[in-house]
Image (spheres, rainbow, N blue to C red):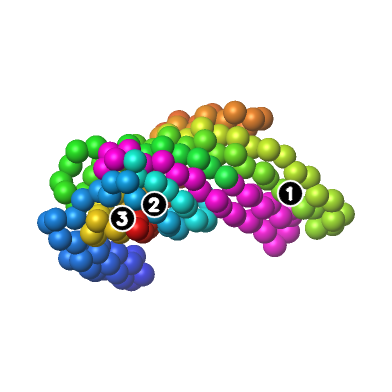
Amino acid sequence: MKVTQLLRTTAVAAAAIFALGTAEAQSPSEQLGLGVTTGSTFGGTVSYAITPAIHVGTLFGFSSFSPKVGNTVSTYSFAPYGRFLFAGSPVLKPIIQAQFDLASVETINPATFQTETKAQNTLIISGGGEYFVNRNLGIYAMISVIELGLSDQGTAFGILTPQIGVEWFF
């Protein structure tokens, strides 16, 4: 029962988002943007549309995991990125994003109150799409394809962490 309700809700939300757009909407150019994103990290973004096809920016993010028993892990991220938007319809553009995630991971042991902090740097390549409701509002969804660990963590290939976000250009 819950799955069908979730599917209906998702379909209604998608229809509402696509109904808001106009055929004139297109990717912004020479505009500053602010946004929010969620995926493995929740955070804010600051971006600049150099051209309609090339956007650069950075993510400032935070995530925390605290199980009932065990260590609490908090991650603080600073992740500059370059996003390339390909030709598509005026409102929906396929995208590829390269992101260099500079993260600080803090682990707290609740039994001893000891804190361990380490750097975790990752090069992330993602693909997806961005829907432009109008010239100033974009909604995107991406899936990581490769996460190349540059610190002591490993490298991952495949359909990995999804990320969704909204950005406002002005």
Name the residue: 45% across, 44% down.
57
Disc nearest the viewer among 2 and 3: 2
In the rendered structure, which amino acid carries the disc numbered 2? Leu
C-alpha span from label 1 to label 2: 35 Å
| Residue 46 image point, x, y percent | 46, 51
Give above or below for 33 relative to 14. Answer: above
Q: Nearer the viewer, residue 64 or 121?
A: 121
Crowd around label 1: few <14 · some 14–19 · many ≥20 (10 Å): many
In the rendered image, the quadrant that contains the N terminus is bottom left
Give above or below for 48 relative to 8. Answer: above
Label 2 SS: strand
Assess whether residue 52 is covered by the magenta stretch: yes
Crowd around label 3: few <14 · some 14–19 · many ≥20 (10 Å): many
Disc nearest the viewer among 3 and 1: 3
Give the labeled residue for mark 1: 107
| Residue 145 image point, x, y percent | 41, 35
In the rendered structure, which amino acid carries the disc numbered 3? Gly
If you read the primary sequence from the N terminus, does the residue marked by circle 3 or circle 1 appear first? 1
Give above or below for 100 relative to 26. Answer: above
C-alpha span from label 2 to label 3: 13 Å
Are dots 2 and 3 in contact, CB under 8 Å? no
Label 3 SS: strand
C-alpha span from label 3 to label 1: 35 Å
| Residue 68 image point, x, y percent | 70, 62
| Residue 117 image point, x, y percent | 75, 44
In the rendered structure, which amino acid carries the disc numbered 1? Thr
What residue span does the magenta drawing correspond to?
Answer: 51-77
Give the labeled residue for mark 3: 138
- Predominant SS along the magenta part: strand
- Residue 61 marker: none
Give the labeled residue for mark 2: 32
